[in-house]
Amino acid sequence: MKPKNQRLVLVIAAAAAVLLAVLLAMWGLRDRASYFFTPADVAAGKAAEGQAMRLGGMVEKGSIRHGPDGVTIRFVVTDGRAQTPVAYRGIVPDLFREGSGAVAEGRMRNGTFVADTILAKHDERYMPPQLGNLAAEHKAAKTLER
């Protein structure tokens, strides 16, 4: 075999190996991918039942309810346009409270978001782009209440 043909075979084999590695990585991560939705997206039907996703927004005031077992918590997440009920079994982060931002990872089941993980917003200046100025609006409303 000529050296020119050997290089061609080597390049084709390397490209096939890289393609195979990418396909294996995508196949292995297919269940790990989660998309970010707001309560308005959920209300619009964009979130499929049972699909792994992240739900973000503000924890609605007066909505946190603790279950009798001490580890189940139910609350409502809002983006100012829609609300989505959330159920979580576990210990919530210290920064989790009513009126603050939260991101829940889990799946929709029968109209309720069943969370596997709760992430509390720790910096007032950050808000996901999908939520726009919700934090600023919430802070302004809080200032007007005083």
Image: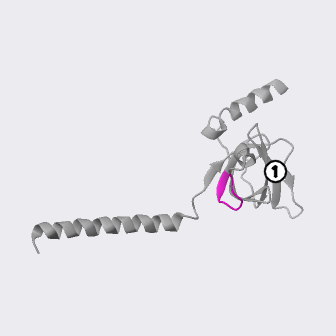
Q: Which residues are magenta?
A: 47-54
Please provide percent x and percent y for residue 22: 41, 64
Classify residue 97 by image quadrant: top right
Identify the residue shown where x is 9% and y is 71%. 2
Residue 120 among those drawn in magenta: no
Q: Quadrant of the N terminus?
A: bottom left
Q: Is residue 104 left or right of residue 72?
A: left
Residue at numbered disc 1: 75
Q: Position of residue 83 (x, y in %)?
A: 79, 44
Relative depth, front residue between 74 and 10: 10
Image: 97 above or below 5: above
The reply to whether residue 119 is visible in this rendering is: no
Locate the C terminus and report the quarter of the image it occupies.
top right
Q: Position of residue 26 (x, y in %)?
A: 48, 64
Q: Is residue 108 left or right of residue 65?
A: left
Residue 141 falls left or right of residue 130: right
